[in-house]
């Protein structure tokens, strides 16, 4: 599932874009103010940002600069009525990957979104190495100090999401949607807490004082960068 943050102050247009882009494999989080988007960025992980520039409480360029500092590899499309050459140059020089001016074709926007999502897929290795840990997700071999660790499928999914986004706080909702993608509505809300607790007990020297799998209270979890 790809997660896209759409920042558009015209609520009707935003709903139309979300309807055009959202599919079985794409979820759109729609925000109408800069403040809403900034709050979401700190608590969620996204695969693409679509940002309007002129907003009632600021500029989408401010969020673009924040995104570039915190998530340099995530693609950003600016979607705005500012169609002067100087506006386009400023947007691209601020770090945008693409610039779409209003009015626009939804079909063209969809094609550009798909192109950025393909480009934004990181080149990943299935082997993660850090300190005493060696996680081979392809072979499903997980080692600590050379000793095998048995992980359930749920624990493997959770671990992969965390180490693939190390240093980024993933919200509880985001983790549940990705781990139990086919049935989040039927999963007990304590299931994630249980999975985190079991994973800590297998990986951490002192699960009550974790060094790696940390809780960010009120938001979710993160794998600490060392």
Image (spheres, helix red, strand yellow):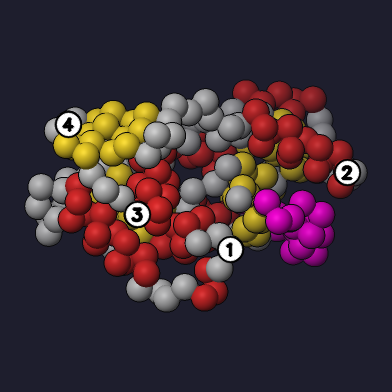
Label 3: which secondary element: loop
Up/down of 113 relative to 8, above or below: above
Residue holding disc 2: 107
Label 4: which secondary element: loop
Give the foreground label among 4 and 1: 4
Mark 4 vs 3: CB contact within 8 A: no
Label 1: which secondary element: loop
Mark 2 vs 4: CB contact within 8 A: no
Q: Which mark sits nearer the N-terminus, 3 or 1? A: 3
Residue at screen point 10% across, 47% down: 205
Residue at screen point 58% across, 32% down: 121
Using residue 191 as the reference point, say whether residue 95 is left or right of it. Answer: right
Q: Which mark sits nearer the N-terminus, 3 or 2? A: 2
Circle on res. 146: 4
Seen from the viewer's position, the closer of residues 121 and 71 is: 121
Up/down of 100 relative to 90, above or below: below
Q: Give x and y (percent) for residue 131.
A: 19, 30
Q: Which mark sits nearer the N-terminus, 2 or 1? A: 2
**Inter-mark Cα distance, 2 to 4:** 51 Å
Give the foreground label among 2 and 4: 4
**Inter-mark Cα distance, 4 to 3:** 19 Å
Crowding at dot 2, Cα within 10 Å, few <14 / some 14-19 / many 20+, comes out as few
**Inter-mark Cα distance, 3 to 2:** 42 Å
Q: Give x and y (percent) for residue 12.
A: 80, 64
Residue holding disc 1: 182
Give the foreground label among 2 and 1: 1
Dividing the picture into quadrants, the one containing residue 136 is top left
Label 2: which secondary element: helix
Q: Which residues are magenta?
A: 5-25
């Amino acid at each position: 599932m790809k997660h896209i943050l759409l920042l558009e102050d015209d609520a009707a247009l935003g709903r139309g874009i979300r309807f055009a882009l959202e599919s079985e494999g794409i979820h759109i989080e729609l925000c109408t103010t800069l403040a809403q988007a900034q709050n979401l960025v700190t608590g969620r992980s996204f695969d693409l940002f679509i940002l309007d520039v002129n907003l009632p409480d600021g500029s989408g360029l401010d969020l673009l600069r924040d995104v570039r500092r915190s998530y340099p590899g995530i693609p950003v499309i600016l979607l705005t009525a500012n169609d002067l050459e100087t506006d386009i140059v400023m947007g691209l020089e601020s770090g945008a990957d693409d610039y779409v001016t209003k009015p626009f074709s939804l079909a063209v926007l969809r094609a550009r979104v798909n192109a950025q999502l393909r480009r934004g897929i990181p080149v990943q290795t299935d082997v993660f190495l850090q300190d005493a840990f060696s996680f081979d997700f392809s072979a499903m071999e997980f080692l600590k100090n050379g000793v095998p660790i048995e992980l359930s499928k749920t624990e493997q999914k959770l671990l992969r999401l965390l180490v693939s986004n190390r240093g980024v706080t993933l919200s509880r909702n985001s983790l549940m949607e990705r781990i139990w993608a086919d049935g989040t509505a039927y999963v007990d809300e304590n299931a994630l807490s249980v999975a985190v607790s079991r994973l800590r007990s297998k990986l951490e020297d002192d699960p009550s004082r974790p060094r790696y799998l940390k809780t960010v209270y009120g938001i979710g979890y993160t794998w600490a960068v060392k």
